[in-house]
Image (spheres, rainbow, N blue to C red):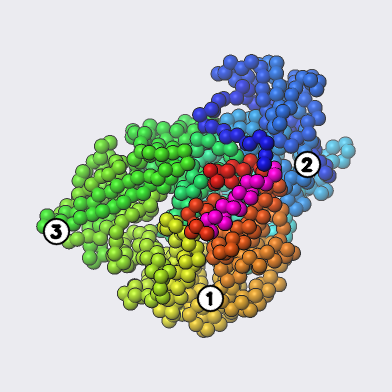
Amino acid sequence: MREAQPKSIFLKDYQQPAYWIVETGLTFELQDGYTDVYSRLQLQRNQSLTADGSLRLDGQQLETLEIRIDGRVLAADEYRIEGDSLFLSGLGENPVLEIHTRIQPEQNTALEGLYRSGSMYCTQCEAEGFRRITWYLDRPDVMSVFTTAIVADGSRYPVMLSNGNCVADEILENGRRKVTWHDPHRKPAYLFALVAGDLLCKEDTFTTMGGRNVALKIFVEPQNITKTEYALDALKRSMRWDEEVYGREYDLDIFMIVAVDDFNMGAMENKGLNIFNSSCVLANPATATDAAYQRIESIVAHEYFHNWSGNRVTCRDWFQLSLKEGFTVFRDACFSADMHSATVKRIEDANIMRTVQFAEDGGPMAHPVQPDSFIEISNFYTVTIYEKGAEVVGMLHKILGKDGFRKGTDLYFDRHDGQAVTIYDFVKAMEDANGVDLTQFRLWYKQAGTPVVSASSEYRGDVGELHLTLRQSCPDTPGQTAKKAMWIPVQMGLIDSQGNDMPVNVSPAVNADGLATWTASSQVLHLTEAEQTFVFSGLTEKPVLSLFRDFSAPVRVEMQQTDDELLFRLQHDNDGFNRWDAGQRLMLNWIAQAERSEFELPAKARAVLAGLLADSTLDAAMVSYLLTLPSEAYVSEFRDVVDPQAIHLGRKRVRLALAMALKDEFAACYQRLLQHGEYRPEPAQMTARALKNLALSYWCEASDAGLNMAMRQFETADNMTDQMAALVALVNSGDAELAQRSLDAFYQQWKQDVLVVNQWLSVQSGSAETGTLEHVSRLLSHEAFDWRNPNKIRSVVGAFANQALCNFHRTDGAGYVWLADAVIRLNATNPQIASRLLTPLTKWRRLVPVLSALMRAQLERIAATQDLSPDVYEVVSKSLA
Ligand code: PHE
Ligand code: ZN
């Protein structure tokens, strides 16, 4: 057990720093085995505090070689280093601090600070990585103008980059090259970046709405230069979109993206120099699936949008993380909706909320969108901060309307440009620009947990009225009980027997705040009390209720609808999202039924599904979602007690029943959507492929003809979307020999391409058929695996524990032991990744008793490990509490 346990940090303890750092000058001497960092910090005493001239700086794993104040070298007894702090005293009003530190990028396996990935150097400073480079005030409210010089062997590192503009490039007397960058925009240290390597660059240009010519550059290792086109295209579309939709223009003459193979997260928005996980930026048709293309498009947009929502206006402290992340995810979601289908994007986002975020809200790590404490901030880059945060911004959009929302963001950017602010400031700008009171709405940021809304209704045919009563409650979460009623926007409609929306007359017409309850332009009821009844009048027949259209609030909805009503809505609801939602509810019922006995698809449902498959006027991607069963993880979130083996069985039976009952329809749909001509990553083609490959996966399950077609597609595909879909179908065919043969062939074809090999790893690890413990254990010693690379760890360990649920939840608990072993191993090398991998083990409380005990035992084993990182300690201790 550790001696001193890591401590929590609290939002309520926030204080401004004693000094500001006006200017930061950095010189990096890159040498083999170590790097010397020389910093020159122009400090300024913070006048709003009564500072006494003493200062504490952050630093981690630094060798401190020299410290000077105003040019004078400090003797060893003139400063104090204690743990991760450097204490200086007796500073004046405007001292200059110069520090020489030495660091070891080669030994850096945590991938925070300066590290090596392959043959290049790169940095990752968010959230607290800069302190691994030099002593600093490593907190986002300290914003500084950075000038950075990189000195290295120019022949081995021909490309040397940092933020801003390149202002000098010289050869020194000793033959080494020195490149200097200056970033005119003040920024916190977490947005600092440096890259050095032997890289190729793909270039383009963009002219902003104000006429600024911006050079766009994507830097990659030479073998990847043919994979840069799509990201560049997505970048230009993002830049245009942010001008059109938010009036935001880019503010430097150069925008760079660098692709690196070893990266803990997806990508990072460093000012003018974004660094990307290569899996989130590199693509060509032969190696990337449509899903990968869409992910690249949205992440490129996300990082670009941060230039305003995050960089120009940044966070005061890390409790405000969702200020930039929630807002930016909302922005990238709207961008994707505009590029593709808004309905499909909504379905995908709700799916993530319901499978992953609701699970987080219901578990030991539940926290508000604005947390009030944490031990390790890296643990708070969560679906709650990102996705729920985006949903909360989305509700503001629903409440204020498009124009009101834009007025709010304009005011926010104007008012706070160049500042480090809070979530409160964001909401205040929305209030001030619209003259509304959002006091109650702010609870969405403060209260953790998923609210439950239950709906009951009564139709009074004699007077033509429907009385709808909505009740809300929110379960207790760690540290929070007795929650208050929130402001929940309920977008809705009433459907007549023909499937048309009925005219709505609702009372009360305004709520307590004077807000219109429902208008022609905003079909939203405002639920603000614990219980409210709405009366709809003038009805000529009993309507079918369609509530929470467009997933208008991140809540669980409890309502009684018969399978017939659900089927009716699947067929007729005028809201695409709610068609999907109705279908999923129906399928949840089927799965529950199939857990108890054999399942046969009801004739009525068969007819509706067949109709969907044949209807070529519908968006094919939406149809493919309508016909996709909820995942096992999704099903689990609708259960009080989770029995993974039962869910697996039930889902499998329903899948087979669908495949058998609609065999001919799937075959016909597949044939209809076969594409000829060149592959392009464009919406029309992508949606058709999505449905075609869904049809193939069912068809395969029902007949040899389908299986033969999958083999043919696997062998002849000219693009990864089709080849991968066929591979997945073959792997899951139940024919172990066929699965292995296909996997082997695929590996031989693609073993030179790291990103494809990672997909190959995750297909097998994540499959119920091949992702057995014996098989994934063998993968760990395969030549393609590497414990230092987060993508590979996610592809094998992450895929096994999060997707192959029936294997992970083996009834002897061996899956849990295996995952705990991986966590313990990674705790020592990459704590961030170790901690993220732990998530499946945090769900022990809701499992059936036998599994629950086995899982808990593994958490206890991890807790008893020597030298736990704060990252792992926090998750384990909170899970056991
Ligand atoms: N800020 C990054 C993003 O969401 C995520 C990130 C966090 C990357 C921490 C690296 C480290 O865009
Ligand atoms: Zn982000």
Mark in the foreground, 1 or 3: 3
* Residues tagged 2 and 1 counted as in contact (Cβ below 8 A): no
Nearer to us in this view, 707 or 24: 707
Which residue is under mark 1? Answer: 676
* Left or right, residue 233 beside residue 433: right
* Horizontal relation, residue 49 to residue 348: left or right: right
Residue drawn at 52 percent across, 53 percent down: 844
| Label 1 to label 3: alpha-carbon separation | 55 Å
Foreground pick, 749 / 654? 654
Q: Which mark, by number, is residue 104?
A: 2
Above/below status of 240 relative to 796:
above
- Using the rendered image of the protein, determine whether residue 705 is visible from the camera's viewpoint: yes
Q: Residue 633: image x %, image y %?
A: 49, 60
* 2 or 3: tag closer to the N-terminus: 2
Instruction: Identify the magenta region.
Output: 851-867
Q: Amino acid at mark 1?
A: His
Q: Position of residue 459 (x, y in %)?
A: 18, 57
Say few, some or many: other residues with alpha carbon within 10 Å of mark 3 (under 14 / 14 to 19 / 20 or more).
Answer: few
Magenta span: chief secondary structure: helix
Q: Quadrant of the N terminus?
A: top right
Residue 767 is inside the magenta segment: no
Tag 2 and tag 3, C-beta contact below 8 Å? no
Dot 2: what SS? loop
What kind of element bears circle 1?
loop
Residue 697 vs residue 341, the one in the foreground: 697
Residue tagged 3: 461
